[in-house]
Amino acid sequence: MQKSTWLKSLCVVLFFSGLSACGSDKPDTELTGWQKEVGQLRIGASQGEDSGMTLARWTTYQKYLSRVTGLEVVVFQAPDYNGIIQAMASGQLELAQMGNTAYANAREQMGDKVTPFLASRTAEGFSGYYSALIVRADSPYRTLEDLRGKSLGYVDFNSTSGYLFPRWSLRQQGVDPDTFFSKTAMSGGHTQSVLALANGQFDAVFMFASGGTPETGFTAGSLYTLARRGAVKMSDYRIVWTAGPMPNSPFVIRTDRPQAFQDVTRGAMAALPYESPQLMVELNLLEGSDFQPVTPADYQVGVDMRRAEIAERRAAPAQKPNNGSAKP
């Protein structure tokens, strides 16, 4: 993407219910039918997954969807997962990409008014991701047990790989995450977690990892993105425990919008890898990746895990240390 084009897309920054919005002007008088009824396509982007590239990536979606749908497409960026969830629930967004936990949260609030419809898949057929517990390579920690009584960095309460999924998986192994670690805190993002580990603020952090398996190794995720940018070295870290896979973060759409709008938008997203393969590079997706159809049933496990986490918190709140209040 040329810098001049990118800057034009970012020429106006507005603030709307705590979200920053970027879009281009298109006269409403040009719209007819379902286009006029919808008015504009508002898509949500959270900085929690990959703060450095989120806006640039969604600007690519913005331009593509505007061309295909004929609508003004506006990108709303929130600083965390909850901002996108609440914007979707309050009717301020039509489209977003959410992790399993964020979707589960939105589903509990909105019911059938929100539904997942696509998720990414690599050329090798990988359609899931993992939560990886990483430590610095110069640390003495080589197993999960080595981290008993040590400090841990979570990503966000609404992060699947950075909070909900590993906590659920640890409990399945008989480990209570609230007592196993001496101190826990939220970093606010996957990139922030890796950098906090590098700076010695935690003994270990949970990280998003994909593009492979624990047996074959991974090719994508927070650590790998930072390494490709030259911000960190892969050799400075090691994975000591993994949980997964979970289905890739879905694109979700509001179902209370006109059916024609939903059909065109879903079709446009599904066709993107084939109609505009060059855009997949701009989206920072692995070569040969595409999107596969998904349904609410594919993400029911996330809903179940979220309910289990809430039940666990309510069961014995007085017995749990308030680790989440600490700040890295």
Image: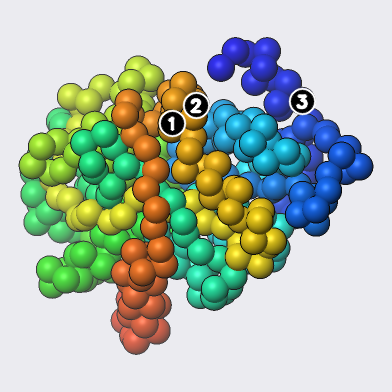
State yes or no: discs 1 and 3 in contact (Cβ < 8 Å): no
Task: Name which residue type carries label 1.
Answer: Tyr
Task: Tell me if residue 237 comes above or below residue 143 in the rendering.
Answer: above
Task: Name the residue nearer the viewer: 282 or 142.
Answer: 282
Task: Name which residue type carries label 2.
Answer: Ser
For label 3, count other residues whose C-alpha is less than 10 Å away and answer few (under 14), some (14-19) or many (20+). few
Asked whether, in this view, residue 78 is left or right of residue 133, the answer is right
At a point 66% along the width and 67% down the height, the residue shown is: 256
Task: Name the residue nearer the viewer: 110 or 166.
Answer: 110
For label 1, count other residues whose C-alpha is less than 10 Å away and answer few (under 14), some (14-19) or many (20+). few
Task: Name the residue nearer the viewer: 100 or 293.
Answer: 293
Q: Which residue is mark 1?
A: 274
Q: Position of residue 204 (x, y in %)?
A: 25, 46
Q: Which residue is mark 2?
A: 276
Q: Report, in whole angstroms, how far the alpha carbon at label 1 lies from the one at label 3.
A: 30 Å
Q: Which residue is mark 3?
A: 11
At a point 18% along the width and 24% down the height, the residue shown is: 235
Label 2's element?
A: loop
At a point 52% along the width and 56% down the height, the residue shown is: 252
Q: Give the foreground label among 3 and 2.
A: 2
Asked whether residue 185 is in view, the answer is no
Asked whether residue 127 is in view, the answer is yes
